[in-house]
């Protein structure tokens, strides 16, 4: 069976597709709603296409329902960082931008670059991700309203409304934290993984929930996980004159980085393995933020290690493994 390529330019209300078949491009626009996804299947059947390698950008959450539909229908699906498509467009010297051209570009990217395949997370992980990301949004709202209160409000009525809103957000945060833990307790697999993660000094129940919600357990290697989180070091060296200070690339999952920042700072004080690691970096005069970033990456790698091994964290065991490796 011939595998054809389908490029998809996704948006909130619609999505544009371009099908590469027999050296020809066929395009169509569909409404982006689960009730109409069957129209895409009918359109593919009309062109005598049984299976495609569909490729789309990770644009907000607009892509998720369609990606799950295509995966469940037996198609291959790739979901790529929009920065990759943007870079590919620049390499092709693309000068125009329309939905149809973007879909064609994505199709060409899929055909030539063969991006990795995507698989949807289990339903319980998908639900957990929605909850932990909403918790992050509530914390952002709480900070914004707190800043408004601290800045001084000349109106007593507005001040009272702000206080009531802050109190409401606090109630929502507390309730959602409890729901997150209840959800984990209801799924033995998630509960076992949370218990493993919390054996690592610096990772508590909520941080473990955030890591599991971002589906770190699906990664096969620490290198790919660190890259996904945007925690890979980025060097800037060219010739003999350009020697920029290394920094995090930050091309990756921002929610995952946020979830690791304060736990990494905690681990720098209480996790013996990360303490020694950071002390060595400090002795080499590394910048403070470089050390924190390295601690975040180290903590993330330890988290994946205990999940894959199924063995609780033991700093002496890890050190012995490293010494004998």
Image (cartoon, rainbow, N blue to C red):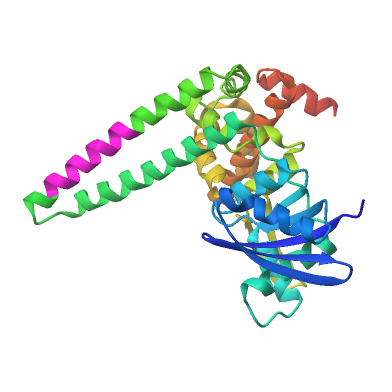
Whole-percent x and y of residue 321?
79, 24
Q: Nearer the viewer, residue 172 or 293?
A: 172
- Which one is in front, 266 or 241? 266
Highlighted magenta segment, given as a residue range: 159-172
Image quadrant where one finds the C terminus: top right
- Residue sitting at 58 percent across and 29 percent down? 124
Q: Position of residue 53 (x, y in %)?
A: 79, 54
Q: Is residue 228 above or below residue 103?
A: above
Q: Is residue 237 left or right of residue 190?
A: right
Figure disc tally: 0
Q: Name which residue lies at 71% across and 40% down.
A: 72
On screen, 155 above or below 216? below
Quick check: 192 left or right of 19?
Answer: left
Q: Please report the residue visible at 68 percent of the width from the left and 25 percent of the height from the top.
A: 307
Residue 119: image location, x then y, percent: 72, 41
**Residue 211, visible in the rendered structure:** no
Q: Quadrant of residue 299?
A: top right
Residue 107 percent across, percent down from the top left: 76, 65
Which residue is farthest right?
1
Does the magenta segment cover residue 171?
yes
Residue 11, quarter of picture: bottom right
Q: In the picture provided, is 128 more to the left or to the right than 174?
A: right
Q: Determine the residue located farthest toward the bottom in the rendered image.
A: 95
Q: Main secondary structure of the magenta part?
A: helix
């Amino acid at each position: 069976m011939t595998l054809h390529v389908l490029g998809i330019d996704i948006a909130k209300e619609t999505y544009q597709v371009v099908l590469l078949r027999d050296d020809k491009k066929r395009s169509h626009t569909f409404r982006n709603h689960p009730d109409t996804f069957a129209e895409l299947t009918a359109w593919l059947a009309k062109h005598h296409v049984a299976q495609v390698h569909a490729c789309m950008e990770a644009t907000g959450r607009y892509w998720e329902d369609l990606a799950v539909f295509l995966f469940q229908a037996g198609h291959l699906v790739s979901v790529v960082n929009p920065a990759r498509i943007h870079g590919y467009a620049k390499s092709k010297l693309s000068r125009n931008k329309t939905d149809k051209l973007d879909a064609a570009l994505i199709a060409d990217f899929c055909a030539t670059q063969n991006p990795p395949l995507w698989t949807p997370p289990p339903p319980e992980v998908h639900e957990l991700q929605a909850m932990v990301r909403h918790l992050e949004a509530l914390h952002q709202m709480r900070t914004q309203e707190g800043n408004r209160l601290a800045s001084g409000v000349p109106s007593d009525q507005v001040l009272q409304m702000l206080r009531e809103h802050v109190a409401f957000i606090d109630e929502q945060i507390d309730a959602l934290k409890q729901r997150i833990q209840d959800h984990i307790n209801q799924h033995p697999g998630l509960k076992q993984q949370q218990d493993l993660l919390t054996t690592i000094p610096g990772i508590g129940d909520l941080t473990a929930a955030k890591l599991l919600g971002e589906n770190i357990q699906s990664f096969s290697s620490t290198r790919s996980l660190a890259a996904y989180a945007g925690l890979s070091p980025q060097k800037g060296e060219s010739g003999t004159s350009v020697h920029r200070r290394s920094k995090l690339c930050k091309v990756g999952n921002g929610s995952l980085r946020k979830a690791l920042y304060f736990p990494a700072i905690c681990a720098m004080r209480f996790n013996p393995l990360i303490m020694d690691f950071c002390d060595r970096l400090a002795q080499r005069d590394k910048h403070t933020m470089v050390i924190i970033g390295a601690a975040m990456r180290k903590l993330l790698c330890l988290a994946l290690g205990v999940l894959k091994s199924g063995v609780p964290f033991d700093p002496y065991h890890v050190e012995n493994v490293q010494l004998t490796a």
